[in-house]
Amino acid sequence: MLNWDDLRFFLEVARTQRVSTAGVRLGVEHTTVARRIRQLENELNTLLFEKSRSSGFTLTQAGLDLLRHVEKMESHLLNATEEVSSLGDSLSGNLKIAATEGFGSFVLTPVAMHFQDLYPGITLDVMPFQRFVSHSKRETDIVISIERPARGPYIGSKLTDYALKLYATHDYLDKSPPLQKLADLMCHRFISYIDEMIISDQLRYVDDIMPRDKIVFRSNSVVAQMRACLQGKAIAVLPCFLAESQPLLRSVLDDTYTIQRSFWMHYHEDLKNLKRIEVFTQYMKQVMEQNKQFMLGKAKQLKI
């Protein structure tokens, strides 16, 4: 009979591919992790990992087969713990929520803090990201992204639409050539993303309106783009939920250039029976439904 504690060590190494990282996550020395993996391999009389300095601990076929079973065991344990704990007066546990930087900082964070007031037994980890976040490695429980998962064992749906517009400071617009039509943009300077590091084609919305030699500042942080725009030296395409709260910024060419995108919320199907997942996702949908106008740039304040 395998020991679940040993399998926890196996899971962390499988997900991180490093005994040192697994040790940090488990709160033990890396030597302890390595010893427990050797012990598990001896018990099973099989090699679970190929080890190398460059790639770390890579699962063998036997390791991959074991991983599928252990992840199911983990999900059953989580569900059982949730079911038992929810018999009490209130929900408890931790939720890890990953979201794009702008949404995570300016929308999700205040919503999450209000949710925590309603369910004080649930702790929240909000992780703004600029890269792919792995469900399988349990880096997160819920992901809010600008693309829906193309495939995989995920449950989710569209959370909300949102709008983006061209923004500049009043000072910049006063000192620059007039902006009355799209062609006038050729006389202006721009802020944009770094092409090689862009996380989604959904963010390539400025290629059709500005020549590359007019882009004077690039960053894959939308918050950095907004901060650069506030300096009054260039124009940026920004989400309305981010820019409308900045009194120094003004949207331009609203009638001819407004972009609409969507946020999607999803989680691994193994978590579908966790009550705290259900409660948070329903709450998030409710809040976004009452903030449609804010997300489209037609209201100034987020309502919670």
Image (cartoon, grey):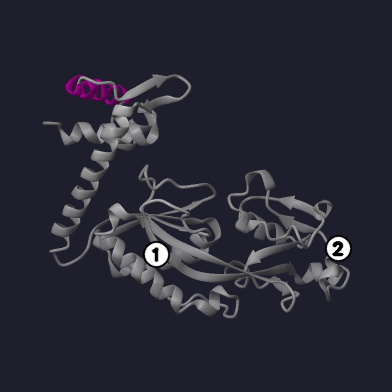
Q: Is residue 71 above or below residue 1?
A: below
Residue 76 horizontal side relative to residue 217, left or right: left
Amino acid type, callout 2: Met
Which quadrant, please, contains the N terminus? Answer: top left
Q: Position of residue 58 (x, y in %)?
A: 39, 27
Q: Position of residue 210 (x, y in %)?
A: 80, 59
Q: Name the image quarter holding residue 256.
A: bottom right
Q: Position of residue 266 (x, y in %)?
A: 40, 59
Secondary element type, mark 1: helix
Q: Position of residue 138 (x, y in %)?
A: 35, 45
Q: Residue at x 57, y 80 (%)?
A: 299
Instruction: Kindly indicate whether the residue at mark 1 contacts the one at mark 2 (C-beta within 8 angstroms).
Output: no
Residue 177 horizontal side relative to residue 238, left or right: right
Q: Residue at x 28, y 66 (%)?
A: 119
Q: Which residue is mark 2?
A: 186
Which stretch is magenta?
A: 30-44
Q: Is residue 205 visible?
A: yes
Amino acid type, callout 1: Ala
- The circle on residue 112 is 1
Judge whether residue 121 is colored magenta: no
Q: Is residue 171 above or below residue 208?
A: below
Q: Main secondary structure of the magenta part?
A: helix
Q: Residue at x 15, y 67 (%)?
A: 89
Q: Residue furthest left?
A: 1
Residue 73 horizontal side relative to residue 234, left or right: left
Secondary element type, mark 2: helix
